[in-house]
Image (cartoon, rainbow, N blue to C red):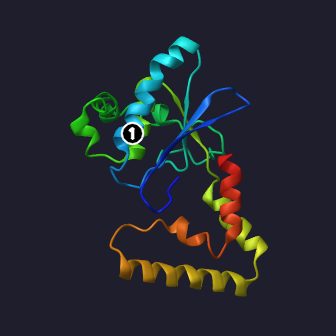
Amino acid sequence: LNSGEGPSYCVLSNPTSGHDVHVIGIDYNKTTNNEKVYNVLTGMEEQCKFEGWKPQVLMENHNCPMPRADILQTGDIIPYSKSFASHAGLQKAVSAVQVERFRGRISGEVVAVLQALRLKYNIMFCDRPHWMTVDRLVSHYSVQQLEDGVNEVVESLTATAEEDSSPVVMENLLLPPFPELFQERQRVMT
């Protein structure tokens, strides 16, 4: 959730489950909203224990080593605890996420993962595998259409890089020339 004016926050009701969905916008790889992420997840802890339900943290992407045979599908739990079980650094970071100074140095995504691990919340993959998206694009477009779309992305990247020194999220540049990526992403997120 990012409107270009910085990250935002909203609470949506889920009529199916009866629970609220907290949507927290995060600027990728920045500390923006990391305190909001921490506070929302912390604030839910007592309510969840009282009501007897376990929240899930939804992530659009992940950086979790996976065995080659395992392909993470949309809706699967991202196995951070299992994949990093032997790394003492993860346990230190999970504990350190409670320290404001530490949180101030890490991104909102990392705060979400560490706080979810600390509170034993599942972290769910809620995007589509990108290799699948590329396969779909190749199967739906002619070579000329793909070339035109890629040229548009490169021109946008060049223009953005010349105008602004902040990191560019490539996925955002792919959406205008390939609108079905946005539609697919919206379906996955709902």
Q: Residue furthest left?
A: 101
- In the rendered view, does 40 fall on the left or right side of 184? left
Where residue 172 appears, as percent x and y from the top left, is 54, 66
Res 103 → quadrant: top left
- In the rendered view, does 61 fall on the left or right side of 104? right
User: Which residue is painted at 26% across and 46% down in the image?
Assistant: 105
Q: Is residue 96 above or below residue 45?
A: below
Where residue 38 appears, as percent x and y from the top left, is 38, 34
Res 34 → quadrant: top left
Where residue 164 appears, as percent x and y from the top left, is 35, 75
Q: Quadrant of the C terminus?
A: top right
Three-letter amino acid code at disc 1?
Lys
- In the rendered view, does 57 fall on the left or right side of 73? left
- In the rendered view, does 117 fall on the left or right side of 133? left
**181 or 84: which is nearer to us?**
181
Q: Which residue is mark 1?
A: 36
Where residue 151 appears, as percent x and y from the top left, is 58, 85
